[in-house]
């Protein structure tokens, strides 16, 4: 049983781990290109989701479609709500600088870092997991656990995420302030919501990588040593991403509202949660979930697949 536990991880995970366990340079380059490409295509949708999550009034009015449309227009386009189509489109690209830094670093850290943690856990605990849970379940749990650990560590990037969210939802708070000034003035205040971020990332990343690996095992990926096809990567990415977003959404809503509060008027997650439940009901915890789910399929298919295949390519080039 010990032998498979040393060999199988490179076949099952990556989400085709044969791609993701190569040279560090390949991981960095492939993940960075995936992050840049994803940012260019999906930043506007992310802006829409963030603005809906930070809207504290009721958006959908069941007996008034016209009022619902007006509310959505105001919530999504903010100051450009009364402008033309081109102005509305451009209004969905605030915080692109912070977004670029955050997204690229996040993808390199997450896509490139998770296989490193997975390799370490497999080397140390692979045989134990196989014996206790069985080979397939053991591989899934190791993948999910390594993803969860990586997700927890992602909190170090929180300041860039916080500034991106503020630029998307409350740009007036950043007006006339340089990056150096913001970091010097706010300091650790930029880590506001760190606890909730950890609480969100741990189960979210567990579901992302665990669901991804479970889907690949179900499809038989890696059993004959072959790498996953584009279609298999896409299906596995969708399964993991949908599970991850759904599990993490309530905490993501609260984290977003913590981050878009004025620098000089912070509120705790507990206060925001209580007011949200009182004013918006439980459904408020899932605001923005629909656009996230609508984009999460193509977004994760795109970024995960690009990262995997480019990493595989650069592994060959950089040998």
Image (tube, helix red, strand yellow):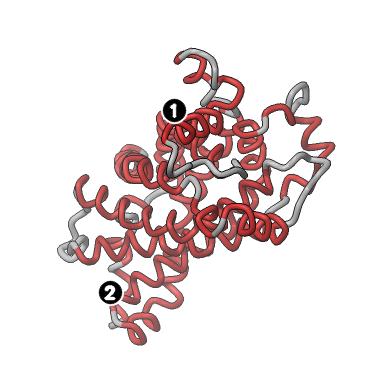
Specify the quadrant of the image occupied by residue 6: bottom left
Query: Going by the picture, which residue comes out furthest to the left?
Result: 224
Q: Quadrant of the N terminus?
A: bottom left
Secondary structure type for disc 2: helix
Residue 8, image x, y percentages: 28, 68
Q: Are marks 1 and 2 in contact (CB under 8 Å)?
A: no
Residue 220 is left or right of residue 236, and the answer is left
Q: Quadrant of the C terminus?
A: top left
Along the viewing direction, whichever of 257 and 202 lies nearer the viewer: 257
Indicate which disc, 1 or 2, sits on the residue closer to the N terminus: 1
Classed neighbour count for the residue bearing mark 2: other residues with Cα under 10 Å, few (<14), some (14–19), many (≥20): some
Residue 95, image x, y percentages: 60, 29
Residue 289 appearing in the image: yes
Rendered position, 293 above or below 310:
below
Classed neighbour count for the residue bearing mark 1: other residues with Cα under 10 Å, few (<14), some (14–19), many (≥20): few
Which mark identifies residue 136?
A: 2
Residue 89 is left or right of residue 167, and the answer is left
Which mark identifies residue 228?
A: none
Query: Going by the picture, which residue comes out furthest to the front?
Result: 63
The residue located at (36%, 86%) in the rendering is 132
Along the viewing direction, whichever of 40 and 106 lies nearer the viewer: 40
Specify the quadrant of the image occupied by residue 162: top right
Residue 234, image x, y percentages: 26, 48
The residue located at (37%, 41%) in the rendering is 295
Residue 231, image x, y percentages: 19, 47
Residue picked out by circle 1: 40
Residue 9 is left or right of residue 154, and the answer is left
- State the CA–CA distance, disc 1 to disc 2: 37 Å
């Amino acid at each position: 049983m010990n032998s498979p536990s040393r060999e199988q991880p490179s076949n099952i995970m990556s989400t085709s781990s044969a791609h993701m366990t190569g040279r560090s340079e390949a991981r960095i380059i492939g993940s960075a290109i995936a992050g840049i490409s994803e940012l260019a295509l999906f930043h506007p949708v992310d802006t829409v989701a963030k603005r809906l999550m930070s809207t504290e009034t009721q958006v959908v009015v069941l007996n008034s479609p016209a009022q619902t449309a007006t509310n959505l227009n105001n919530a999504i386009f903010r100051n450009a709500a009364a402008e033309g189509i081109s102005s509305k489109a451009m209004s969905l690209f605030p915080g692109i600088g912070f977004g670029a830094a955050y997204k690229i670093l996040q993808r390199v850290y997450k896509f490139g870092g998770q296989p490193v943690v997975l390799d370490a856990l497999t080397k140390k605990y692979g045989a134990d997991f196989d014996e206790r849970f069985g080979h397939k379940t053991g591989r899934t749990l190791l993948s999910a656990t390594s993803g969860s650990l990586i997700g927890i560590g992602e909190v170090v990037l929180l300041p860039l995420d916080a500034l991106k969210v503020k630029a998307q939802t409350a740009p007036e708070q950043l007006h006339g302030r340089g990056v150096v000034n913001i970091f010097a003035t706010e300091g650790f205040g930029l880590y506001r919501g760190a606890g909730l971020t950890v609480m969100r990332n741990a189960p979210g990343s567990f579901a992302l990588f665990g669901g991804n690996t479970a889907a690949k095992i179900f499809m038989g990926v890696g059993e004959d040593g072959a790498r996953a096809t584009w279609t298999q990567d896409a299906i596995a990415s969708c399964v993991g991403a949908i599970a991850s977003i759904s599990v993490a959404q309530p905490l993501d809503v609260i984290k977003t509202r913590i981050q878009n509060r004025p620098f000089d008027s912070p509120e705790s997650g507990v206060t925001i949660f209580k007011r949200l439940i009182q004013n918006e009901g439980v459904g408020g915890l899932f605001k923005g979930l629909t656009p996230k789910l609508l984009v999460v399929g193509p977004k994760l298919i795109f970024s995960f697949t690009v990262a995997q295949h480019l990493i595989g390519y650069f592994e060959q080039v950089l040998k």
